[in-house]
Amino acid sequence: MDDYVVTVQNLVKHYKDVKAVDGISFSVNRGEIFGIVGPNGAGKTTTIECIAGMRRADSGSVDVLGLDPVKDSLALKRRIGLQQQESEIPDRLRLWEAMELFSSFYDTVLQWEALLKQLNLWEKKDSFYSELSGGQKKRLFVAMALIGDPEIVFLDEFTSGLDPQSRISIWKLVKELRDQGRTIVLSTHYMDEAEKLCDRVAIVDHGKLTALDSPSNLISIHGGHTRIQFNVGDVFDGESLSSLKGVEFIQNSDNVCSLEVSSSSAIVEIVKQLDAMGQGLDSFKIEAPTLEDVFLNITGREVRD
Ligand SMILES: Nc1ncnc2c1ncn2[C@@H]1O[C@H](COP(=O)(O)OP(=O)(O)O)[C@@H](O)[C@H]1O
Ligand SMILES: [Mg+2]
């Protein structure tokens, strides 16, 4: 039986004449890591804010844990945690004071000491908020989103601007939260992050949902061909490769041969053929499509800001 914790149907939200969300529908399963990805201005933050009860949708319906996020906002706030893309707290608040304060808002809380340790903030517990780096502030807001022992955690662009170590430690924490049975709804514009972390990914563009599936299904449906490259000498004849089954494209320039193949059996045939031709395979590289390719294939390559 389906066990949805969030159901969004035909969500529409304008800001004056800007249609930020244009009829989005999806459901989030209990216990999954659900990713929302899309270019800048796609409507990710607005969608998350409508689900978490921070904004009222113009039309459509949102159900979160059987509650209406606007009408039942108080009841919902006790059961969800939200890390917003842009948050601030008073500069002169020390970290431990902030954690104590936020703990006092909830009936059930997680140990904030443990959260600060997991997020590598323990040694900063006596520092003022104003003394934190950008990445430390970001991690503090993740800790605050978790303090109320939430059933659903919303993380909006939770790793932008973080160094690789912090990203890895937050990924680990997000997986632990999921393994504890919580649901995580996150937005990101890092495709490697969405691919590694999310059970399912929704691609949003211009306020519309353009694809929704597991990263591996998205890649096999929209990722395109696997690319192969290897170095060749001045005289290389690729004719015998281009006729192999599954070879979709071949180009030979600057002593590099590039191919695109539509099946893994084509790779085997290429290697066999090259071996028969006495071609060395030291530089042979296989690049399978990633979620980044899916994203670019679906949303295009022009820059948004
Ligand atoms: N508070 C606001 N007032 C006016 N326009 C906004 C506001 N917030 C977002 N927008 C606009 O709505 C669209 C969607 O924004 P947003 O939901 O923040 O997208 P994303 O999080 O995907 O970058 C953008 O065109 C953005 O400029
Ligand atoms: Mg945003």
Image (cartoon, rainbow, N blue to C red):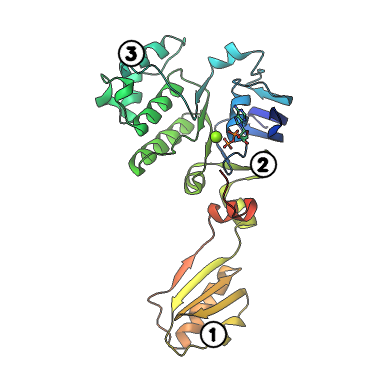
Q: Secondary structure at mark 1?
A: loop
Provide the residue designation for mark 2.
206
Binning the other alpha carbons within 10 Å of mark 3 as few (below 14), some (14 to 19) or many (20 upward) gives some
Q: Quadrant of the C terminus?
A: top right
Badge 2 amino acid: His
Where does the image place residue 70, in percent across and percent down from the top left? Answer: 65, 16
Q: Residues within 10 Å of mark 2 (few under 14, many from 20)?
A: some
Question: Where residue 199 appears, x then y in whole percent?
Answer: 55, 41
Whether pointer 3 and pointer 2 mark residues with C-beta atoms closer than 8 Å, the reply is no
When the figure is inspected, residue 161 is found, relative to residue 101, above or below; the finding is below
> Reading the chain from its start, which is encountered first: label 1 or label 3?
3
* Disc 1: which residue: 238
Where residue 91 is drawn, which disc sits there?
Answer: none
Is residue 32 at all visible to an observer of this figure? no
Gap between marks 1 and 2 measured at Cα: 43 Å
Checking the image for residue 97, the label placed there is 3
3D distance between C-alphas at marks 1 and 3: 68 Å
Category of crowding for the residue at label 1, using alpha-carbon neighbours closer than 10 angstroms: few (below 14), some (14–19), many (at least 20): some
Task: Give the answer, above or below, for where 208 lies relative to 287.
Answer: above
Q: Name which quarter of the figure residue 138 lies in.
A: top left
Q: Is mark 3 within 8 Å of ligand 2?
A: no
Relative horizontal placement of residue 245, taking residue 255 as reference (left or right): right
Taking depth in this image into account, of 104 and 27 the one nearest to the observer is 104
